[in-house]
Image (spheres, rainbow, N blue to C red):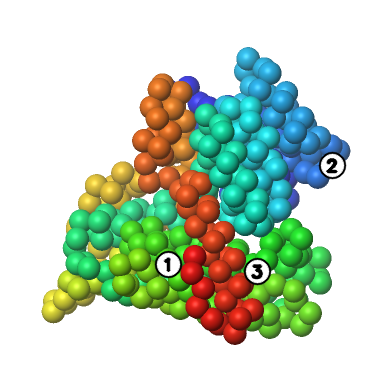
Amino acid sequence: MARLRLGMVGGGNDAFIGGVHRIAARIDNRFDLVAGALSSTPEKSAASAETLGIARSYGSFTEMAKSEAARADGIEAVSIVTPNHVHFAAAKAFLAEGIHVICDKPMTSTLEDATAMQQAVADSDALFVLTHNYTGYPMIRQAQAMVHAGELGDIRIVQAEYPQDWLTAPMENEGVKQAEWRTDPARSGVGGSVGDIGTHAHNLACFVSGLAVESLAADLQSFGAGRKLDDNAHVMLRFAGGARGMLWCSQVAPGNENGLKLRVYGSKGGLEWHQEDPNYLWFTPLGEPKRLITRNGAGAGQAAAAVSRIPGGHPEGYLEGFANIYTEAADAIRAVQNGTPRDAAMGLLPGISEGMAGMAFINACVMSSWQDAAWVTL
């Protein structure tokens, strides 16, 4: 199968997440990265393109969208890996040209831009994929399939947490670019930790449980001196259908590196998964001993096998989860090019609806916290 021609906005040579996306796009050999507007200035963009071996460099994403759309060999899809405030304008430019968009999360920096993004997607024939990469992990697919098959019964409780410690010290004042923009409301949006990592926990809780959050009560804190955005959040959740849950996200919890965890409990049993040990899924049927299901091991089904590459016992994790999103995006793009309707092509890929849900979650958390943790309907 011919590789898709890919462009990238943001993600210059020294950008962590740009490197992750480039690796993910290459793992299954489905994309060729041929063009980019990689940095905020034409000079920096050109320098990064030369270092990375990217053939065509542009000084802006608007120039790139128009120029690539006019070429017979122009890009078919674009990865947007900028700070949050650029997502909407960049995605809109490419969607308007019929170029498929793969966008980092959260979808935008404001709910207003998210609503406009939803319209831009509706007005385009192109796909919009949001890189909630944790939904690409094999054992998360296993968990989602088990819940969908009714193995847990009626879902009652969903617990998600995502603690980190990297902002315990004021890294934004020490020249750390990742910290600078994430703690800046103008670039990150109204949410700090809830936008950066809380959206991942929220998305994972909804993806596996199959439920939507109807209302929440949130208590957000900014423990960093002078920090304008939250770095810790405790959120109570009410799901459609009556299930209840809690979500904790923090970037000031010493001893935690990337501690995303999910627990789902129903009338027939429970599931537990830890991102830092991603090939293991614990399943406890009611009244029976706890069981360990391993990736490509006994008890794992087709949902996990479909996104696994190597035999059980060989670790797969963060990069492979990202790669699964890219590979499924490539499949979806080819399907749409061959006449499959967009919604049917998307499958389990996160897209505009998940992006809107994430933005509603962020804004509801902030609004609730402003009102002393009052309940807010999404």
Which sits in the foreground, 363 or 220? 363
Q: Position of residue 89 (x, y in %)?
A: 70, 43
Q: Are marks 1 and 2 in contact (CB under 8 Å)?
A: no
27 shown above or below 184:
above
Label 2 CA crowd tier, 10 Å (few <14, some 14–19, many 20+): few
Q: Earlier in the sequence, mark 3 or mark 2?
A: 2
| Residue at left offset 27%, top offset 69% | 155
Q: Specify whether residue 226 is in view.
A: yes
Q: Secondary structure at mark 3?
A: loop
Q: Nearer the viewer, residue 41 or 105?
A: 105
Quarter in which the N terminus is drawn: top left
Vertical arrangement, residue 21 with respect to residue 255, above or below: above
Eye-nearest disc, 1 or 3: 1
- Residue in the picture at 69% in, 62% down: 189
Out of 352 and 311, give the one closest to the viewer. 352
Earlier residue among tags 1 and 3: 3
Q: Earlier in the sequence, mark 1 or mark 2?
A: 2
Helix, strand or loop under label 2 = loop
Q: Which residue is mark 2?
A: 41
Q: Residue 367 bears which disc, if any? A: none
Q: Residue at x 74, y 74 (%)?
A: 228
Determine which of the numbered discs, if any, sits on residue 192 in the image. Answer: 3
Give the residue type at disc 1.
Glu
Three-letter code, disc 3: Gly
Q: Which kind of residue does numbered mark 2 sit on?
A: Thr
> Circles 3 and 2: CB distance less than 8 Å?
no
Q: Quadrant of residue 341?
A: top left
Q: CA distance from mark 3 to mark 2?
A: 26 Å
Give the x, y percent position of residue 46: 80, 35
Crowding near pointer 3: few (<14 within 10 Å), some, many (20+)?
many
Disc 1 target residue: 214
In the figure, is residue 93 to the left or right of 318?
right
